[in-house]
Amino acid sequence: MTYEELLTATALNDEQVIVMTAENRALVRNLPAVLGKRFIDTGITEQTMIGAAAGLALRNRIPVVHALAAFLTMRSFEFVRTDLGIANLPVKLSGFIPGFLSDANGPTHQAIEDISIMRGIPNVTVFAPADEDDLVKMLPQIWQSPNPAYIRINTRKTGYEHEPFELGKAEVICTGSNVTILTYGLMFEQALIAVDILKSEGFSVGLVNMRSLKPVDEEVILKTVATSNLIVTLEDHFLTGGLYTIVAEVLLKHQLTAKVLPIALNEKWFKPALLPDVLQHTGFTGKQIAERILGYQTMHLQPSVLTHAFSE
Amino acid sequence: MESKNPQYHETEAIALKVREHIVRMSTAGGCFTGASLSAVDLVVYLYTEFLNVTPFNLNDPNRDYLFLSKGHDVPALYGTLAELGFIQKERLEKHLSLDDYIYWHPNTNIPGIEFHSGSLGHLPSVALGVAMDLKICGSSNKVICIMGDGELNEGSCWESVLVANAYGLDNLIFVIDRNHFQANMRTEDLIPLEPLAQKFESFGAAVKRVNGHDFAELDKAFKSYPFQKGKLNVVIADTVRGKGLPSIEERADRWFCNFSAGEIDELLLELHGTHTTSLTSETLIVR
């Protein structure tokens, strides 16, 4: 099932659902004809769309709101914080082309601080699906939940069949005693490749799809730290405020230390190009990730992430 | 309060009471006295003469809605809600106290307040969403959003005008409390707004400009709602900052006031027209 099919079925089944967009119809092209007045396009007005969604939610609607992730989260940030966060209204933010998915658009369109800023707003929940199968498994629960939610939309098809979703729970793909990769979103695809390479090198490797970033699955983080020698946090997001920070917060809260290798973007927007080239250039292909982990494991190489920003 | 029409005697009496409440809130921490006095007649008129919203229909989704986007006007709203029985008058004595929620900006802990505000340029879009839903539901109820003229500097206000008009929201009325002041400056000295009616009209709205202190004029304008089928309604209400207290009227430095108890007594006498005060700015704390 695609995102649009799920949204169509949900909206047709539930009169409360309103679909909104700020003239970003890529994910919802067929919905105007189906939903009539329950499809609202406010034009290129992200902040006004958020305010209007708050007004609709005051009338007991559940607005599912679409815009490019960069503008949905940053252009309208204070509207999300003030109109949705303070009032705790069940508006569902569908931010698409987040992270590397904005590939050739350039830094204006790069939502690589979105997890950080959205999770900083009280009441706002944050989710990052690994692919379209993960996305459609997550959304029914997210849409039914009473809180505002930010979903880092990812409609890529990976062929991976995910476990059922539970709010606040991660999906453990496999476990391993040498190294465990914690990741979310687009990087899940590359993590699968990295895991295969590392396994072929004889390592015992784990992989966790973190999918629910707020609330986060603390238990899975603590369990991974207890059972795996090295934790790798892998994300197409700035180092600050994303998964690495979340793991650090959980460890500190429980007065624990662990060997953690962060693979993230550090203090620098990525070079725009087509997605495969972006991944390669930035060092985020499955193969490059495996090499970094192997280098770290064998101590022959230093973790390059922390120097990446200043090395070019 | 300009009206001498006996039809509005009760409305005038309520407005005077609301001004008394504002004066009393202007001490022990103070409030946005000048800013809120300009909107008193608007708020009182709308609740007593125009809107179908009462303490008894707040749970009815098909009531009318009033959103106060210009948050500094909230003493006018607190006073009106108290006089009309939405909240007990005693609660106003808890102004700025941790024991209640009567503080400097609107919040939904107070029955009758539909949404919080304080950050400017937000409630035009929230009101827009409510008006959209009333249209979808086929309800003929109306939605008011009171905005300050200084607030119109925020671009989001104008986005909302564009969108409201695109969706033909003639059930939505934006009311501009046009007192010609921003916080500390005259609007025309900082970011000029005139010709304001033409600005709104060029964005597609149907505009009426009235004396915001004249109940007969307000009545004539609002009762002709919707001004034009399929268009956003805009009422530009020309008002006087500090209206009712000559000693603070039209003064940039009386946006926020924190008077001493003695000054409050003097101001109440001035309000009732029996006394003229000569308050000096040194006795005030101006934000």
Image (cartoon, coloured by chain):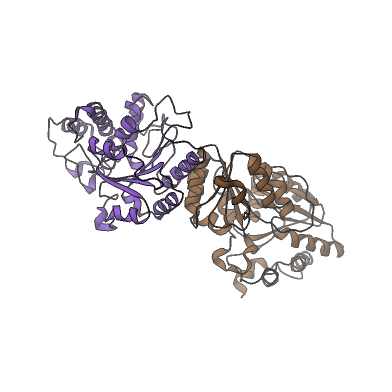
Chain colours: A brown, B purple
Q: Residue A180 appears at what percent x and percent y?
A: 77, 55
Which residue is more in the foreground, B13 or A280?
Answer: B13
Looking at the image, residue B27 sits to the left or right of residue A23; the answer is left
Q: Is residue A193 visible?
A: yes
Name which quarter of the figure residue A182 lies in. bottom right
Quarter of the figure that contains the N terminus of chain B:
top left
Which residue is more in the foreground, B72 or B172?
Answer: B172
Determine whether A272 is above or below A217 in the image: below
Looking at the image, residue B165 sits to the left or right of residue A217; the answer is left
- Spot the residue most to the front: B229
- Spot the residue most to the bottom: A312
Q: Residue at x 34, y 53 (%)?
A: B200
Q: Residue A137 appears at what percent x and percent y?
A: 72, 47
Looking at the image, residue B224 sits to the left or right of residue A27; the answer is left
Name which quarter of the figure residue B66 lies in. top left
Which residue is more in the foreground, B45 or B81?
Answer: B45
Q: Residue B105 appears at what percent x and percent y?
A: 38, 40
